[in-house]
Amino acid sequence: MAHNAPGRKARPLSPHLQIWRWGPAMFISIMHRATGNALAVGGIVLLLVWLGALAAGPDVYALFQLIAGSPVGLVVLFGISLVYFWHLVSGIRHFILDIGAGFEVKGNNFWSALVPVFAILLTAAFWAAILLR
Amino acid sequence: MGNGTSIGRVRGLGSAHSGAHHWLLQRFTAVGNLVLTIWLAVSLVLLPNYNYITVHDWIVRPIPTVALALLVISVFWHVRLGVQVLLEDYVHEAGSKFAVFALLNLVVFGAAGFGLFSILRLALGAA
């Protein structure tokens, strides 16, 4: 924008990913955006294909079940569920940050590191509940 | 607008030209998503199987129909706001920005319309 506007001197750019030392909060913040936008594509497509297949009737739904239940389909479903639970847990972390809590370095690093742990636990519980039903 | 920090930037003239309303809506829809998607996940776990009859007969009941329709609205609204932030950070040219926002609106409204239509079609007994 401003830095390539004609007749204006190039302004220095803010430093991007390569310049910062990696830490838990940085990783979790990047992953929040990554998981959110992944869901905006993958999760939405899955939701609409599922609803559309149901609305289209038993034959189309049977085809959906066949694809979703195949090994590749199950890997995709598992992946989308993990990304969903990750974004959910990470989003709850954002709610806590929004009220002004959890900004101290030690606590922030601790809760950031716990996001993947809770995401994996919730995903495992979800699939265990379905498969052991 | 000056080059450094100026009162103009503080008064809503940053790169996005607005902010608090978008920020709040993203939180409100996030709360909606939290409630509704957890409801969906729990409901899916509680279904005895995923046969057409089972899922169909569950969806056409009043609460699942309304909750799923609200889920579509809340989720797609949240998607619209979230992807907008990504685009604002990486698409800098005004014309391109207008184009990708127009495309984002078309995709999100079209997709939400399809989702709501599918739910209504099931609920009203046309499928």
Image (cartoon, rainbow, N blue to C red):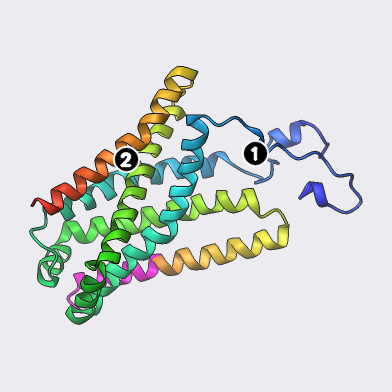
B122 is within the stretch colored magenta: yes
Q: Residue at x 26, y 45 (%)?
A: A123
**CB under 8 Å between discs 2 and 1:** no
Instruction: Read off the residue under disc 2.
Output: A119
**Badges 2 and 1, same chain:** yes
**Camera-nearest residue between A132 and A37:** A132
Mark 1 — on which chain does it sit?
A: A
**Gap in angstroms between the C-alphas marked 2 and 1:** 27 Å
Residue drawn at 25 percent across, 67 percent down: A68
Can see residue B39? yes
Q: Residue at x 32, y 35 (%)?
A: A117
Looking at the image, residue B1 sits to the left or right of residue A97; the answer is right
Residue lying farthest to the bottom in this orientation: A59
**Residue A122 occupies which quadrant of the picture?**
top left
Q: Judge whether B4 appears above or below A35 on screen.
A: above
The amino acid sitting under disc 2 is Ala
- Boundaries of the magenta span: B112-127
Viewer-side label of 2, 1 = 1
Disc 2 sits on a residue from what chain?
A
Label 2: few (<14), some (14–19) or many (≥20) C-alpha neighbours in 10 Å: many
Image disc number at residue A18: 1
Residue A126 is left or right of residue B23, and the answer is left
Q: Inspect this view and state whether residue A101 appears.
A: no
